[in-house]
Image: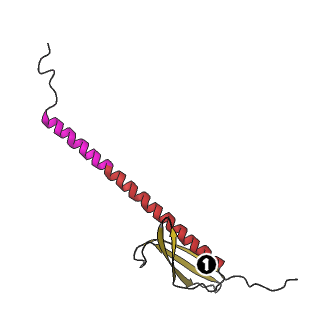
């Protein structure tokens, strides 16, 4: 026969402490998972915003307007969302070179931009000349 001392289970206090430890561990895991999902969402937003900015810069390079127009604004639909872009053009020391910055966000007022991309645009080559 077994004695009562050897077959004794856990006390209520021990069970409560074990549940508390598991609750703390579960909370930490949930916080880490939530933080990870938020990071993935931010990375996705930055990726799409960078694509919007790149598309705008490619449109700018296809356009032969010199100098590029400053303070232009527009929208682009991508990933089932409307992205708002704003174009800033700054002069450089070289008269044939302009710095162009495209600021992209999900807010029409640009209060919280997602990303901005800067590049330099050169003056388009003169067309025509000697055809031979």
Q: Position of residue 23 (x, y in %)?
A: 24, 45
**Which colour scheme appears in the figure?**
secondary structure
Provide residue 124's location: percent of width, then percent of height. 69, 82
Determine the secondary structure under disc 1: helix
Q: Position of residue 31 (x, y in %)?
A: 32, 53
**Where on the picture, by quarter, is residue 21?**
top left
Instruction: Look at the image and tell me in which quarter the C terminus lies.
Output: bottom right
**Direction front: furthest residue:** 80
Q: Is residue 7 magenta?
A: yes
Q: Residue at x 32, y 50 (%)?
A: 30
Instruction: Identify the residue shown where x is 43% and y is 57%.
Output: 40
Quadrant in which the N terminus is drawn? top left
- Residue 51 against residue 88 in the figure, above or below: above
| Residue holding disc 1 | 60
Position of 96 with respect to 85 (left or right) is: right
Q: How many marks?
A: 1
Q: Nearer the viewer, residue 64 or 91?
A: 64
Indicate whether residue 48 is drawn in magenta.
no
* Majority secondary structure of magenta residues: helix
Left or right placement of residue 27 versus residue 75 in this view: left
| Residue 12, percent from left and from top | 13, 35
Q: Most extreme residue toward the top, as rendered?
A: 1
Which segment did they paint magenta? 1-29
Image point (59%, 74%), residue name: 57
Tell me the crowding category of disc 1: few under 14, some 14 to 19, or many 20 or more residues within 10 angstroms, Cα based. Answer: some
Residue 75 vs 130, above or below: the answer is: above
Residue depicted at x 57% and y 85%: 69
* Residue located farthest toward the right when viewing the structure as drawn: 132
* Camera-side residue of 60 and 99: 60
């Amino acid at each position: 026969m077994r004695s009562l001392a050897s077959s004794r289970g856990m006390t209520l206090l021990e069970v409560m402490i074990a549940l508390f430890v598991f609750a703390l561990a579960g909370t930490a895991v949930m916080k880490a998972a939530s933080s990870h999902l938020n990071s993935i969402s931010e990375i996705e937003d930055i990726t799409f915003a960078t694509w919007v900015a790149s598309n705008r810069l490619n449109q700018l390079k296809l356009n032969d307007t010199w100098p590029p127009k400053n303070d232009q604004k527009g929208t682009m639909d991508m990933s089932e969302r409307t992205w708002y872009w704003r174009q800033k053009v700054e002069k450089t020391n070289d008269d044939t070179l302009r710095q162009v910055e495209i600021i992209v966000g999900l807010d029409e007022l640009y209060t919280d931009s997602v990303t901005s991309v800067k590049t330099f645009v050169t003056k388009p080559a003169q067309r025509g000349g000697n055809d031979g």
